[in-house]
Image (spheres, grey):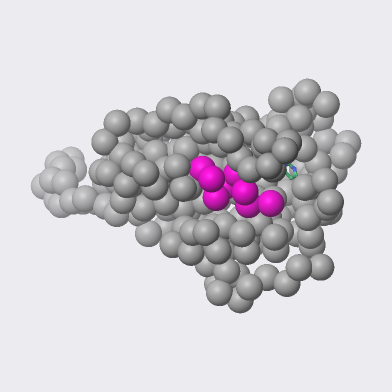
Amino acid sequence: MTPIDPAARANVHLVDHPLVQHKLTLMRNKEASTNSFRRLLNEISTLMAYEVFRDMPMQEVQIETPLETMTAKVIDGKKLVFASILRAGNGILDGVLSVVPGARVGHIGLYRDPQTLKAVEYYYKMPKNMEERDVVVVDPMLATGNSASAAVTRLKQSNPKSIKFLCLLTCPEGINTLYREHPDVPVFTAAIDRELSDHGYILPGLGDAGDRIFGTQ
Ligand code: URA
């Protein structure tokens, strides 16, 4: 088993709230239907968003309550981008958008070249003016860390203000790889599983997240 680099582990926020853990257990069960898997992922994403946005910058605005004028805080959702790694990342979007509905959404498509095993980009579409925006990359499974790392490398070319990585499950290999390439990117996850299989699956894991979200098994 691969040990986790302590510095990399310190960069991981484990969201161990009982509501999240309960729903994750239901999702791991191979008997969960496509419908319930998708609904649970949606619910967990909403709950995890609370942790991801804990340090979100706020602005002050003047408002009128029924009684008087006050200065109150608001977030500027339009400055936020959710960058979904296709296709499983899309399973997280509805949940996080229900919390920050004004956020922009980008997509990154990557496939693994069978010869070189490197991530190759086939699709990339982000909002304009990325240098003004904070980005949350979303993908349910941080497994080898190769596509996560390639996605972050690509996003950094547009110079966003910050990048965070939100997943549901990860493992020592994924944490170490992403940290080695991008130590400035914090990871938010609901679980750190035991290991990566020889076929690139997280163990014990939950199987292929894309297939389970979209019912394509
Ligand atoms: N991607 C998945 O969907 N599942 C894994 O276990 C690893 C990568």
From this view, report whether residue 6 is shown above or below residue 156: below
Q: What residue is rendered at 21% in x and 50% in y?
A: 59
Question: Which of the four quarters of the rendered structure image does ligand 1 lie in?
Answer: top right
- Residue 90 location (% of width, % of height): 58, 31
Find out whether residue 205 is within the magenta segment: no
The answer, for residue 43, to whether it is visible in the render is no
Q: Residue at x 42, y 43 (%)?
A: 155
Q: Say which residue appears at 87% left-offset and 39% top-offset.
A: 30
The image position of residue 194, as x and y in percent, is 79, 62
Quarter holding residue 211: top right
Which region is colored magenta? 144-151
Closer to us: 138 or 49: 138
Residue 118 found in image quarter: top right
Q: Using the image, determine if residue 6 lies above or below residue 181.
A: below
Q: Closer to the camera, 129 or 39? A: 129
Instruction: Classify residue 63 as left or right of residue 179.
Output: left
Residue 16 coordinates in the image, percent (x, y)? 64, 61
Residue 33 % position (x, y) = 81, 30
Mark yes or no: residue 185 visible: yes
Q: Is residue 53 left or right of residue 114?
A: left
